[in-house]
Amino acid sequence: MNSELKKELQIFATQIRMGIIEGTYNAKAGHPGGSLSAAEVFAYLYGKEMRYNPKDPKWEDRDRFVLSKGHCAPGLYSALAYKGFFPVEDIKTLRKIDSYLQGHPNMNTVPGVDMSTGSLGQGVSAAAGMAKGAKYLGKDINVYTLLGDGEIEEGQVWEAFMFASQYKLDNLCVIIDSNGLQIDGKCEDVMNAEPIDEKMKAFGFEVVVINGNDFDELDSAFEKFHSVSGKPFAIIMKTIKGLGVSYMENEVGWHGKAPNDEEYKIAMEELNNKMKELEA
């Protein structure tokens, strides 16, 4: 990846992180930890990888993205806002009673959201169906879906994987945010899904394991996705939950709570300093 594009994506990821903190702080609720760990992949998907048009969110030939771990909506909303789907200022209305930005993505109210999600395990099934539909219609459309490593404890996820393999959905890219933490603690203690890569290979996927907070590794992974045919593709991203905000990093308590006034101030100061460093 060239240095100019990489810098653009790093700036975009920092903006996304700012939006996550802004949204959850103003809502006094939400899920910052798993949104922050996925900031780089949100930035890569909407900054380089996917075909879409903010002025025509329902453009028929766009690529599709399904946020299967729907509680990480603050990250998706931030990416969409900074790409012009709706005003960045609206991020502050997250979870408010009269806001269109609900706690989980709603395709009926939010421009750019391709599938309503929230019940864990269901989003990937919808994504597989979209990929099958695109194949059936002969459309050159890729479908991307982001899952959490806690989410893949759901049995429906593996049914969707079987479906994707059965129908050779090489236009489907399954991304797993493997940050090692879920609401009740470490994934390995709650319900250990490892080895995720070997299991997905056994389910018929082409699999890569990467540092999901590194743009060069993301770039190589998505390039490989485009080179594989005849089988679905999976990217297992090793990430740090809460990355970008020092006191949230790798802390399970930040799975589902909002920063208070002092915590908000610290987080935004850190992210503003990061932005100045990138823009220097």
Image (tube, rainbow, N blue to C red):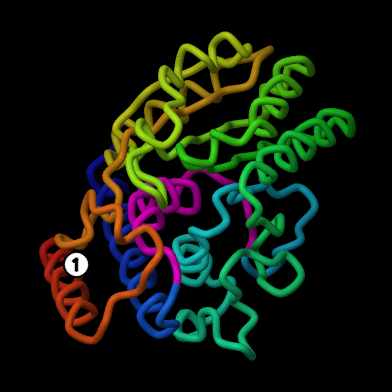
Q: Name the spot of residue 172 as percent of width and height, x first.
A: 65, 30
Q: Going by the image, does 188 lie left or right of 86?
A: left
Residue at the image point whose x is 59% and y is 71% from the top: 85
Label 1 is placed on what type of residue?
Met
Q: Going by the image, does 192 lie left or right of 232?
A: left
Please check the rendered image and state whether residue 7 is part of the magenta-colored stretch, yes or no: no
Q: Name the spot of residue 88 as percent of width and height, x first.
A: 46, 79
Please tell me whether the stretch drawn in magenta is mainly helix, strand or loop.
Answer: helix
With respect to residue 25, does 227 lie above or below?
A: above
Q: Going by the image, does 40 lie left or right of 243?
A: right
Of 71 and 204, which appears nearest the observer? 71
With respect to residue 251, does 268 lie above or below?
A: below
- Residue 218 visible to the viewer: no
SS for tag 1? helix
Residue at the image point whose x is 39% and y is 53% from the top: 34
Of 2 and 147, which appears nearest the observer? 147
Please check the rendered image and state whether residue 31 is part of the magenta-colored stretch, yes or no: yes
With respect to residue 242, does 57 lie above or below?
A: below
The residue where tag 1 is placed is 275
Q: Residue furthest right?
A: 137
Extent of the magenta region: 30-53
Residue at the image point whose x is 54% and y is 17% from the top: 200
Residue at the image point whose x is 47% and y is 21% from the top: 224
- Residue 39 visible to the viewer: yes
Q: Going by the image, does 48 lie left or right of 68?
A: left
Q: Residue furthest top?
A: 202
